[in-house]
Image: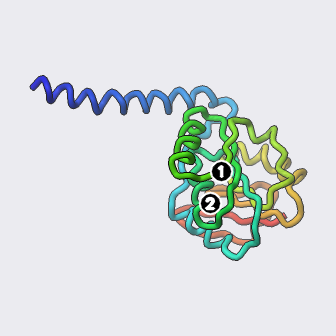
């Protein structure tokens, strides 16, 4: 009985610790993210986006609010392109760095607010952000994204932009070209 109880505690305590890290990471940035949570992009959406990008010449990619870096790793695995990501949630940032290192993906993740980043050098800009943040992001993209830049928004349309393509994979994925 004692070993069973110790076994249960050995499983539950690390899980409780991980959940606490997630909660503290979310709470620490809730104001800056306007309530947006760290939610991973599904594998099905990532595959659809990568299929759409197939045939593009070597491109410079950024993932705004990259979470655990899942999209960046998938781009690297498929195209050999080491993109960059921005993540302010400390827990998601930690996971991205850890998973990138474990998977040997040489992508860069910055623990920095992407609103303070210069987006003018990227050819592809990807994000899975909530509508409140998109209202603030749209003017920045209009000002900084260079002509020809592909902008990809998972789930929510980018205000003031007209998509050239919308894929329905679980939820919509919007593709824009500047």
Q: Residue furthest top?
A: 2
* Sequence-wise first label, 1 or 2: 2
Badge 2 marks a residue whose secondary structure is helix
Q: Is residue 60 left or right of residue 171?
A: right
Kindly identify the residue that appears in the image at 75 percent across and 41 percent down: 114
Residue 157 % position (x, y) = 70, 58
Residue 94 % position (x, y) = 56, 36
Kindly identify the residue that appears in the image at 69 percent across and 43 percent down: 86
The answer to which of 133 and 74 lies nearer the viewer is 74
The N terminus appears in which quarter of the rendering? top left
Q: Is residue 12 left or right of residue 69?
A: left
Colour basis: rainbow
Q: Is residue 166 left or right of residue 139?
A: left
The C terminus appears in which quarter of the rendering? bottom right
Give residue 6's quadrant in the image. Answer: top left
Report the residue marked by disc 1: 107
Q: Residue furthest left?
A: 1
Give residue 60's quadrant in the image. Answer: bottom right
Q: Does the CB distance between marks 1 and 2 fall below 8 Å?
A: yes
Residue 126 % position (x, y) = 70, 56
Badge 1 marks a residue whose secondary structure is loop
The answer to which of 34 and 58 lies nearer the viewer is 58
Residue 148 % position (x, y) = 85, 66
Mark 1 and mark 2: span between their CA atoms? 8 Å
Q: Residue furthest bottom?
A: 55
Report the residue marked by disc 2: 76
The answer to which of 43 and 36 lies nearer the viewer is 43
Kindly identify the residue that appears in the image at 62 percent across and 54 percent down: 72
Q: Is residue 61 left or right of residue 72?
A: right
């Amino acid at each position: 009985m004692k070993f069973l109880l110790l076994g249960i505690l050995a499983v539950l305590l690390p899980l409780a610790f991980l959940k606490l890290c997630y909660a503290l990471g979310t709470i620490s940035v809730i104001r800056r993210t306007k309530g947006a949570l760290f939610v991973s992009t599904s594998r099905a959406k990532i595959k659809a986006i990568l299929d759409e990008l197939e045939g593009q010449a070597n491109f410079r990619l950024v993932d705004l609010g990259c979470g655990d870096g899942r999209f960046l790793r998938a781009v690297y695995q498929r195209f050999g392109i080491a993109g960059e990501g921005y993540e302010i949630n400390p827990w998601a940032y930690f996971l991205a760095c850890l998973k990138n290192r474990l998977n040997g993906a040489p992508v860069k993740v910055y623990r920095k607010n992407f609103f303070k980043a210069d987006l003018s050098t990227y050819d592809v800009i990807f994000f899975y952000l909530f509508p409140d943040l998109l209202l603030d992001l749209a003017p920045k993209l209009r000002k900084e994204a260079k002509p020809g830049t592909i902008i990809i928004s998972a789930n929510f349309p980018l205000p003031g932009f007209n998509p050239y393509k919308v894929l329905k994979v679980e939820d919509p994925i919007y593709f824009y070209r500047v």
